[in-house]
Amino acid sequence: MANSTTPKLRRRITLILGTASPRRPLLEMLPFLFPETGEIDLDAILLEDETQRRAAELPFVRELSLLTTSEREFGTAQFERAISLCRQGLEQALRSAARRDDVTLTVRCVGAAVGCLQEFALASDITLFGPPRRFGQELLPVAFRARRRGRIVVVIDDLSTGSQALAVAGQLAGGDTSRLSVIVGVGAGERPSAADISAAIALPPASIRRLTDTGIDALLKLLHDEGAAAAVLGVNEQALSANALEILRRRLRCPVCLVRITDR
Amino acid sequence: MDIRPGKALPPEALYHATDLQQLRFESTADLAGSLEIPGQYRALEAIRFAADMDLQGHNAYVLGPAGSGRHTLVRHFLNDKARQREVPLDWCYVNNFADPRQPKALSLPPGLGRQFCADVDQVIEDTQSAIPVAFESEEFQNQREAIAEEFKELQEKAFGELEAEARRRNIGIIQTPTGFAFVPLRGDEAIGPEDFEKLPEASQRQYHDDIAVLTKQLQRLTRSIPKQARDMRRKLRELERDITTMAVTGLIEDLLEKYRDHQNVIQHLHAMQADIVDNVSLFLHETDASESTARLPKFLRDGESAARRRYAINVLVDRSECDGAPVIFEDQPSFGQLVGKIEHEAQFGALVTDFSLIRAGALHRANGGYLVLDAAKVLSYPAAWEGLKLAIKSAEVRTRSLGDDLGLASTVSLEPEPIPLDVKVILIGERIYYYLLSELDPEFLNLFKVAADFEDRLHRSNDNVNSVAELYAGLIRKENLKHLSRDGVARLTEESARLAGDSERLSANIRQTSDLLREAHYWATSNDRELIGAEDVQCAIVSRDRRASRHRDRLLDETLRGTMVVETDGSRVGQINGLAVMQLGDYAFARPQRITATVALGAGKVVDIEREVELGGPLHSKGVLILSGFLASHYVTDRPLCLSASLVFEQSYGGIDGDSASAAELCVLASALAEIPLRQSLAITGSVDQHGNVQSIGGVNQKIEGFFDICSARGLTGDQGVLIPVANVKHLMLRHEVIDAVRRGDFHIYSVDTVDRCVELLSGMPAGQMDDTGEFPDGSFNGAVRARLLDLADKRRAFTASNGAKD
């Protein structure tokens, strides 16, 4: 019997969380990335910070709780327990979503090695990682922690490689393209004009900005100026260095969604 | 017309027909017609007085029998009166933003309440658009972000300074899963435990000390965050208030201008504006709806409903359609229907309420006008009477829940602001309620100072007969009935007189005669007549009588079959025919009853057997006791009464009351004493006084007809008849069969004024008058009675003497 069925779309999503980073912004974004049809493999990774482990091994280091402002012991046992609780909490939070949307879920804890972000990004269709916790962030009124309907900024080099990132950004915006901004980077290829982008994704030209510098600081500044609630970047081996990704993870104040650029 | 006592009454005395010459029309079609109730001048004057009297407590109680047209008269009068008065104020309840449990009452000129409600609705609708737009504006968002950024920068600056301070000491701040920690650094990396151990002891101590100092500084820093967050929230609230005020002010200003003459409305609008500013979140539901609220039922997450509900106007009383003062007839005067209700809604299993669920009661609707209530109904609903009195007394309506008052419900409820009350309450009820309330409720006469007493009967004057004809004409037009011919009106008024039990009066029971008119209309239609004539009215009377007379016919049947013994010929000692009236519903009929008496030697006591077995009422017993007085004073003033007599209503198995049989009882007792037989072909009714005068009784027509029916069924002999008190002759309105029999000489009706006259007719002997020596003539009835009493006295003396000697 001839097999005429087309292969199902399978999307691999990697969610990367640090042991000291807030998970809520990422969990809120996650459902928007699930395609309406097809299968999803969700790999949730808890990055264990080497510096934290080393600090925990020092005999005199004490932790100051942000919520209670009280000091307490911070030893290896406390650290291990905190990691375990983090993992359990993450698994619990994802399991219900996975069950609801028929997602294949794995949760694991790995040591944070240099270049691991890029490695994960290239092995997944979409990689999500979040902003670091900011001092005093927990004490802000809920309305100020994140602009739920804030701007989603897409960073692309050209229309051909950026189309996948634009598509994901459109998903995150829930189809509301007025929430999208586009930053056109300094790529190797020909840079698309604003008119091309406007025509391609029906965006007003005012929402399109151009990077004039290849430095990561310039990108961070532009993202900050745009008031990004989420940044969507297309990545391949040439697009962003591991170092740049690490800087983004540490310094960008919004969740980052890396979309692996594949050949069409 | 010879109607002297003791004589048989002529046929003309037995029925007083309406003189057709009195009636100034050919048929009621000639009359304009009116629904005015005739003859109730006294009551109408009282109602007019109560309606005009502005002072508190001059409410009216309209007392009178059912069917007398009380409601009709009151309705007509008050409707006319109300049209001449001003339309009272509209009343609304609004949210009391300072204390939602105590909603505020607003009064507005008539018709403006509904307009105000619509205006406020419009403002709410506009506000629902304006506020989200203002909050979505770039200016607001920028200012909002600026406040947040200011807070963040403040925190990060302090944190950065601390971090720099730590850096200077080769110490770094790291994030831990739940907070922060300080670690010694080498370059940018934290020193591992082995490397730290290799440091000189002084360096290690220095790190210890520095970290302790830095930790204290971080602690101070983190403890300052909540206060700064509070400041930020305050700034945010101020920003929101400013932007909301800006958005709302323009919308409300128009209303402030429109209602500038109504200070209470202006106050409410200002309060509403301030409250919108404080509760702006009610208008931001769509932009702020989170995923969790989106899962709630629609009515809970519906911000539009919440805002509308909070600020809408509850128009309690709307007078926009009124013409004059209100006249409210409340048919169901329960507590809630009178003072209003506070309804509740179920939300998640709990009962909740607010000002919008306050419902008007009859007092609210009648405020500024008249409220007409049925007294019996008010008294029958729990707490309704107390609620009504409280409202009248305090001159204000306090809407509250009866369940709360009685402690039955423990739900959240309201205490709405009382509404000033200016209402004239008209209670309509039976007389008994008026007198009972007067007696038992000390507040009643203070609150209902005016009694409008309806007549039971009207004079059968020319004017009244013609007024009644006008009423019939009005009813005919209203109900589209056939018109009455002149003789039809005459027959109806004759029946009305019979219903009144008096040939010189008309019944004030309009309902009965109106019903008769409707039934006569049926017969006229059946007989294909253009007008309702006397024959149709007669058909209606006979038909109605037949429908109601099952019980009477049964008793008559049993009498004719001999089961119930009533003799209508011959003579008997110690036996007489009395006449009792039975009332079953609207229908009254007479039942002839055999009364017997026995006499023996005794101590002067007349035993009423009905009384002994508790079947006789107090009035009946009174009548019997009068007999003893009469016997002693009339026959033997010089001796003690030495008899023992007993009286009984034979074959009477129910209660009996009234003194209308006392004349019969006296005659039968005298017969038993004198041992003189009485004619069984006669029946007698009448009460007697201690001097032997016969007094009037009730139901004379039914009594005569009751005995006539038995005699007629057995065959009239010409010897039969009924003795009635002279005072009752004017009440006679007998059936035509009776009058015909009298006219033929087959039946007789005698009017009597004294017992002597009765015994003469019943025994056929002269009664005899006592002479100066205290003796009656030989051969007289009274002489025989006296002789027997003296004989009994002698025997008693002899008996007492012989018994005393033996002792």
Image (cartoon, rainbow, N blue to C red):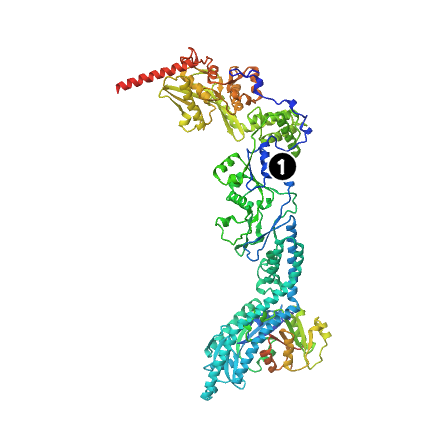
Task: Measuring from the top left, give residue A106's x and y in whole percent.
Answer: 54, 73
x, y percentage for residue B477?
66, 33
Residue B264, placed above or below residue B49: below
Which residue shows up at 65% across the image and 65% down it?
A: B134
Residue type at mark 1: give it. Answer: His
Query: Where's residue B368, x and y in %?
Result: 60, 44
Q: Nearer the viewer, residue B563 or B761?
A: B761
Q: Residue at x 55, y 78 (%)?
A: B158
Outermost residue to the top: B778
Q: Looking at the image, which is closer to me, B517 or A83? A: B517
Horizontal side of residue B203 vs B161, given as left or right: left
Which residue is the extreme one toward the front? Answer: B55
Front residue of this view, candidates A176 and B428 = B428
Which residue position holds label 1? B76
Q: Chain of mark 1?
A: B
Residue A2 seen: no
Q: Is residue B622 left or right of residue A115?
A: left
Q: Image quadrant of residue A222?
A: bottom right
- B432 to B255, vertically: above or below: above
Asked if B132 appears above or below B561 in the picture, the reply is below
Q: Secondary structure at mark 1?
A: helix
Image quarter hosting the C terminus of chain A: bottom right
Q: How many marks?
A: 1
Where's residue A165, x and y in %? Answer: 65, 74
Horizontally, is B255 left or right of B553 in the view?
A: right
Label 1 crowd bin: few (<14), some (14–19), many (20+), radius 10 Å: some
Quarter of the image where the N terminus of chain A is located: bottom right
Quadrant of res B305: bottom right
